[in-house]
Image: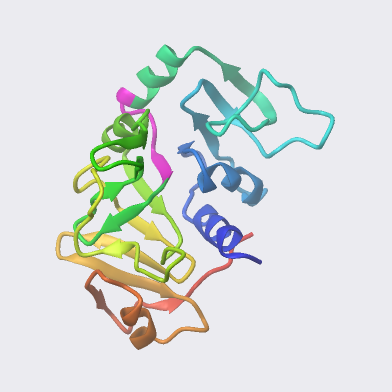
């Protein structure tokens, strides 16, 4: 199991029966493939679909039905397809319980930077898109990302360095190494990978975090 699948499987455990959940571009779209059959999650995608399921089998896909990453989806009984104006009325109207977003950086104050990839001194790609609406409209924001970049530098920071998508909006951070909740006092460690010690985690985490030994548990792998 690679780091991305580990994150996606763990994130699926956060979702509760009956919730309306938006899956953002990147890793989040894969979560639809790892939902327990006992849970009835109503997935929403910003490009205009409600109540979809996992990736269809090869050959059974319909190019008209896609998620935020333009990948094919299955439509479940009661599902609907609609225009993007209706989709953002759902998001901005506060009807999304949880949004799950990939991130470039998150920090100990709950700030998230998930859109600005620098390609020149003062220019960024590709643009914020619907993320700015999602972090403002959803009741809960979960940020998922690899704990470190390809050079081994922490992506869980004291303060984000890239332009922000939202300030103080993240509730939960899930990486391949740990799960943090964002509290008014900063980050609190909830879960840690079984092959890590707290001391080792602190060494690869730029952000400060608190530890309650009675609450921290081993990282859950999911369905």
In this view, the residue farthest toward the right is 59
> Considering depth in this image, is 21 or 143 the residue closer to the camera?
143
> Is residue 13 part of the magenta span, yes or no?
no
Q: Position of residue 110 (x, y in %)?
A: 23, 54
Observer-nearest of 122 and 62: 122
The boundaries of the magenta stretch are 92-101
Side (left or right) of 59 relative to 219: right
Q: Quadrant of residue 61?
A: top right
**Front residue (pair 112, 193):** 112
Look at the image and tell me in which quarter the C terminus lies. Answer: bottom right
Task: Please determine whether, in this image, residue 55 is positioned above or below residue 31.
Answer: above
- Residue 125 placement, left or right of 211: right
- x 50%, y 55%: residue: 11
In which image quadrant can residue 215 be found?
Answer: bottom left
What is the image's colouring? rainbow
- Give percent across and percent down for residue 18: 50, 39
């Amino acid at each position: 199991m690679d780091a991305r699948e580990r994150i996606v499987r763990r994130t699926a455990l956060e979702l509760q029966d009956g919730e309306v959940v938006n899956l953002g571009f990147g890793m989040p779209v894969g979560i639809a493939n790892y939902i327990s059959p006992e849970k009835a999650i109503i997935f929403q995608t910003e490009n205009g679909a409600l109540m979809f399921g996992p990736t269809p089998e090869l050959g059974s896909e319909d190019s008209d039905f896609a998620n935020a990453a333009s990948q094919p989806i299955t439509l479940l009984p009661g599902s609907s397809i609609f225009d993007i104006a209706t989709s953002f009325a759902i998001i901005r109207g506060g009807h999304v319980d949880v949004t799950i977003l990939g991130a470039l950086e998150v920090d100990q104050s709950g700030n998230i930077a998930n859109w600005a990839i620098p390609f020149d001194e003062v220019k960024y790609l590709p643009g914020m898109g619907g993320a700015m609406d999602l972090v403002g409209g959803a009741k809960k924001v979960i940020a998922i990302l690899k704990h470190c970049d390809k050079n081994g530098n922490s992506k869980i920071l004291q303060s984000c360095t890239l332009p922000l998508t939202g300030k103080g909006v993240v509730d939960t951070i899930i990486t391949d190494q740990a799960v943090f909740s964002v509290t008014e006092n900063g980050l609190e460690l909830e879960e840690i990978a079984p092959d890590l010690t707290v001391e080792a985690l602190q060494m690869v985490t730029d952000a400060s975090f608190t530890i309650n030994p009675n609450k921290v548990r081993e990282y859950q792998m999911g369905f």
